[in-house]
Amino acid sequence: MITGLDHIAIAVPDFDKAIKRFMEDFGLEFEGAEDVEAAQTSTAFFPLPPTSIELVHPLEGRGPIAKYLEKKGGGLHHICFRSDDIEADVARLKEKGYQFLSETPNPGAHDCLTIFIHPKCCDGVLIELNQPPADH
């Protein structure tokens, strides 16, 4: 079941400059950065309970975020809903006709399982589902 809005992700062409902006200009707490090899992204999180802002940047200049930035420049990339049972949510949504960008959930930031719903199923909005690890 979907239990909340986990984060809003913003694709950024200059990772360090964007981190500095959110810390210094907006005064937000910086939770830290993490490279997610499976997604080919570098991520930075700024908690705003009960949700957070995630900055995403291409890891080593490759991957889907690099393609997004080439095509659109920086901007809102996706919203992420937290799930307490991602497998059940995926099965339920597939039964309703939703298409996903992968067959099964994959490892994401903070050791979460993640999967993306194709934007054509949600009026052009890329939606991620994630399930935090049991000890989170």
Image (cartoon, rainbow, N blue to C red):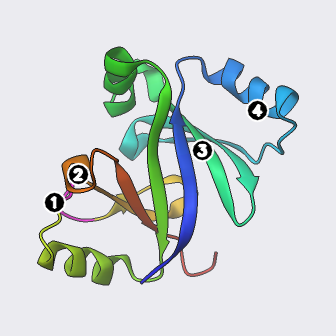
The quarter of the picture where the C terminus appears is bottom right
Q: Tell me which amino acid carries mark 3.
A: Glu
Q: Main secondary structure of the magenta part?
A: loop
Q: Where's the N terminus, which quadrant?
A: bottom left
- Which residue is at 26% across, 74% downward? 90
**Splitting the image into 4 quarters, where does residue 12 fall?**
top right
Give the numbered dot on residue 118.
2
Residue ID for mark 3: 54
Closer to the camera, 113 or 97?
A: 97
Q: Position of residue 51 (x, y in %)?
A: 66, 61
| For the residues bearing labels 3 and 4, Cβ distance under 8 angstroms | no
Which residue is denoted by mark 4 in the rendering?
A: 22
Sequence-earlier tag: 3 or 4: 4
Residue, disc 1: 99
Q: Secondary structure at mark 3?
A: strand
Between 99 and 65, the one lying in front of the other is 99
User: Could you tell me how far apart the alpha carbons at marks 1 and 2 are, in whole angstroms?
Assistant: 6 Å
- Disc on the earlier residue, 1 or 2: 1
**Highlighted magenta segment, given as a residue range:** 100-104
Residue at 72 percent across and 29 percent down: it is 19
For the residue labelled by badge 2, is the local secondary structure a helix, a strand or a loop? loop
**Do we see residue 62 in this rendering?**
no
Q: Are marks 1 and 2 in contact (CB under 8 Å)?
A: yes
Separation of residues labelled 1 and 4 (CA atoms):
33 Å
The answer to whether residue 129 is left or right of residue 120 is right
Q: Which label lies toward us, 2 or 3?
A: 2
The amino acid beneath tag 1 is: Gln
